[in-house]
Amino acid sequence: MRKLSIKIWSLIIIFLTITVIFMSFFTNFLYDQLYVKDSEQSMIEIGERLQSIYKGGKVTDEMVEKVEDYNMYSIFNVFAVRNPRELSACVPFDIDYNTLIGPDERRLLLKGETVTKIGYEERFEREIISVILPLTDQNRLEGIIYLYYPLARITELANSEVMLLIGSVVLFSLVIAYFVHKGLCHIMRPLNELQTAVEKMSAGNYGTRVQVSSNDEIGNLTEAFNKMAAAIQKEDEEKKTFLATVSHELRTPISYVKGYSEAIKNRFIDGKEKDEAIQLIYREANRMERLTNELLQLARSNKENEPFEMYPIVLSETIRESVNLLRNQAEQKGIQIEIIVDESIIVLGNEEKLKQVMINLIENAIHYSSEKASICVLTKIIEGNALIKITDNGIGIPEEDLPHITEPFYRVNKARSRADGGSGLGLSIVEDIVKQHNGKLVIQSILGTGTTVMIELPIMEEL
């Protein structure tokens, strides 16, 4: 954060420096264009008025006196002379006649044009602006009107005002620096808190939060960080719960396998009990295999960068094949599976994945239905989507459990054994597959009456 504050202060200093340089050039521009040009124009206008008094011929004493009378009241120094060389007796500084009126200037004066000159004069220790207007008659230079004025320095134009300006700039700079410092502290405080919070998060403290103190971009950033922290904390807690549940799920079959295999090895059991122990080991090994496969599948389904292949599928065929695979299991309990399907429905999906969904849901319906019950599998088109509806007359699901049944390892009957109730991953996998097909899963159930599972999938658009 120190680097950021240094950058901001550097930008402020650069800005102030550029401003000072600009003001310096701008001030000189104003001095030349306004003050000097204005003085020159005023002197020319006065000279032209006095020049208009001259009517030709020799320059009379009366003409010279009128100019001298005007000189007493003018802010500019004005003289009229018959011979330019007489100027040295009129002005309080040395004049180099050849420099003042050289050949080029003489030609201009003979044409009736005005000559303006600016030069440094040691007597006044400043620049002198002078204006020469000709008094000509029949292409002869009978005399000149000479005006001069010592130009003030920039600092002399408004000496007290300049000091006031400098003081104001210094005071203004201090005020700006104070408020910039306060503003930087105000900006840096939440950024420093965010940095500290990020460091705590990196160290594993996912409960870290930062107080939102503003409604600006930094406040939005802080709020986004808190949301991210909450999401990471939730994910971390879910991961810990998931790992603990997986460990618990595997511990039971492993303990069975280990215990009974040691008993068989040490010949603690024999005969019929041995056969039962081998059968139990086989069953628990199958449970571990199934659980491992489901965990791997659940992990793959959560990877958005590993999409599966999608192609047109006749939904009715997929449903019939899934039902046929479970027909024997249903017949063992005397359960009738009724199939009512729309043969025209075609969806874009993965047949193996959709079979897995159907098998899981129909198998659940068989498992939780009583003997000689009935199950109905129906498909139809509703609002442009394909609806798959699986209805059973089984034991049902309590209302409070419905929002959680698709969570990994969630079990409705906590007292039911894992062997009877499955791994608790089936519906979670089903939900992920349906989402990957851009579909929607809805489960409705009444305890003691039955369960209805509905899946909506987009129909493949006709080409």
Image (cartoon, rainbow, N blue to C red):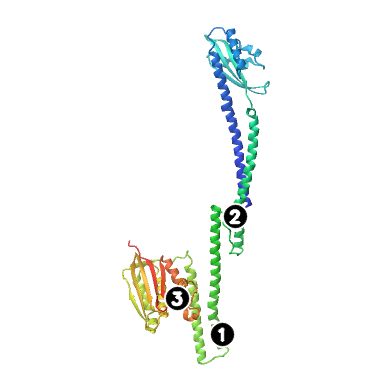
- Mark earlier in primary sequence (3, 1): 1
Q: Amino acid at mark 3?
A: Pro
For discs 3 and 2, the disc positioned in front in the rendered view: 3
Q: Quadrant of residue 358?
A: bottom left
Check disc 2 and report the residue beneath it: 190
Q: Which of these two is toward me, 281 or 3?
A: 3
Residue at 55% across / 12% down in the picture?
Answer: 135
User: Distance from label 3 to label 1 (Cα)?
Assistant: 36 Å
x%, y% of residue 343? 31, 71
Q: Amino acid at mark 2?
A: Pro
Q: Is residue 4 left or right of residue 370?
A: right
Q: Which of these two is toward me, 442 or 292?
A: 442
- Mark earlier in primary sequence (3, 2): 2
Check disc 3 and report the residue beneath it: 398
Q: Crowding near pointer 1: few (<14 within 10 Å), some, many (20+)?
A: some
Check disc 1 and report the residue beneath it: 259
Q: How many marks?
A: 3
Q: Amino acid at mark 1?
A: Gly
The answer to whether mark 2 and mark 1 are in CB contact below 8 A is: no
x%, y% of residue 394? 40, 79
Residue 107 in sight: no
User: Distance from label 2 to label 1 (Cα)?
Assistant: 58 Å
- Circle 1 SS class: helix
Q: Which of these two is toward me, 301 or 409?
A: 409
Residue 151 to residue 333: above or below: above
- Mark earlier in primary sequence (2, 1): 2
Which numbered tag is attached to residue 111?
none
